[in-house]
Image (tube, rainbow, N blue to C red):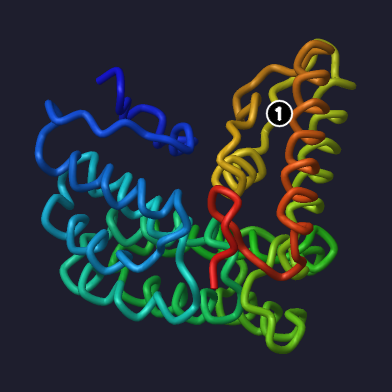
Amino acid sequence: MNAFDIRQFFFWYGPPELKIDINLPVPWQEFSEILSNFKSGNFHERERLLDLCCRYRDEKIGIFGLQLFFSVARPHDLKILDRYTQSASDEELKTIAVFSIKSMIGVSLAKWFVSVVDKIASHEIKSNMGDQLMGLLSKEQRADFGYHAPILKILDAIERYTPPDTQFIFAGKPAFLGDIAIRMQLLMQVALSIQPPAILGDGTGPTLLSAATGIECPVSYTTVMSLDKVKLVLDYVKAVSAMGKAIGGWKRGSKYFYGHEIV
């Protein structure tokens, strides 16, 4: 699949201009059409995307579709997920919950997340879900929580710390691409200070930046840091900043997909 390599969807959604290969299986052709519309700033086919996920929920396209859905989801889009979660297995519910944290949706997501976890029958899976939800809090806000903290207490903290009328948050603050880039650079410095240098250990930052800008981040969670990688990251952050200036500045509290604000 040269024109449409499905492996890219683990991390990035491909270049802004995506050639639709007519030799692809029909479901992937439909997926690529929806994706192309999203990349152009047309986000009206979220329900069509979810229908595709439901039809092919046991295949890779269903997983990629869910990941894409959360990349463009708004708080009120969560309600259409009910058609998917009604018959989902525990493992599917876990996947949905984990993907949802990267949506950057704040209080609405936290409440919805708790409702999904309530549907999970497996105690082992359920006990780890609170640790995922804490991803919506900052390091300082998480200080009073240990592993496997009660999920309702985490929800209470998210409601308490999130500023009123804030739809999208990242690490306890209104979402801002600059903050995501700074956090990634700090983790990069920590990884580089270890001898031998460690992996970046940040899967959220690169994924969010890549989806928001359409520019592929040069590092990922498993990237072993080096001075060459540092230069690539610094150049990447400059490109993200330049793109922001070109569209009038990245707005704090907003969410983007390929440079288009999601409203």
Indicate the quadrant where residue 132 lies. bottom right
Indicate the quadrant where residue 77 lies. bottom left
As rendered, which of 168 and 117 lies closer to the eye?
A: 168
Query: Looking at numbered disc 1 in the image, what kind of residue is underneath it?
Result: Leu
Q: From what the image shows, is residue 137 above or below residue 158?
A: above
As rendered, which of 144 and 197 lies closer to the eye?
A: 197
Q: Position of residue 186 (x, y in %)?
A: 85, 38
Q: What residue is rendered at 61% in x and 74% in y? A: 106
Q: From what the image shows, is residue 17 above or below residue 65?
A: above
As rendered, which of 42 and 130 lies closer to the eye?
A: 42
Q: Position of residue 250 (x, y in %)?
A: 75, 58
With 157 as the anchor, is 43 left or right in this view? left
Q: What residue is rendered at 51% in x and 74% in y? A: 109
- Within 10 Å of the Cα at label 1, are there few (<14), some (14-19), or many (20+) other Cα atoms? many
- Viewport quadrant of the C terminus: bottom right
The residue indicated by pointer 1 is: 200
Q: What residue is rendered at 45% in x and 66% in y? A: 73
With 139 as the anchor, is 114 left or right in this view? left
Q: What residue is rendered at 41% in x and 61% in y? A: 42
Q: Is residue 135 visible?
A: yes
- Viewport quadrant of the N terminus: top left
Indicate the quadrant where residue 61 lies. top left
Q: Position of residue 175 (x, y in %)?
A: 71, 64
Q: Is residue 148 visible?
A: no
Q: What is the count of numbered marks?
A: 1
With 124 as the anchor, is 60 left or right in this view? left
As rendered, which of 238 and 186 lies closer to the eye?
A: 238
Residue most extreme to the bottom: 164
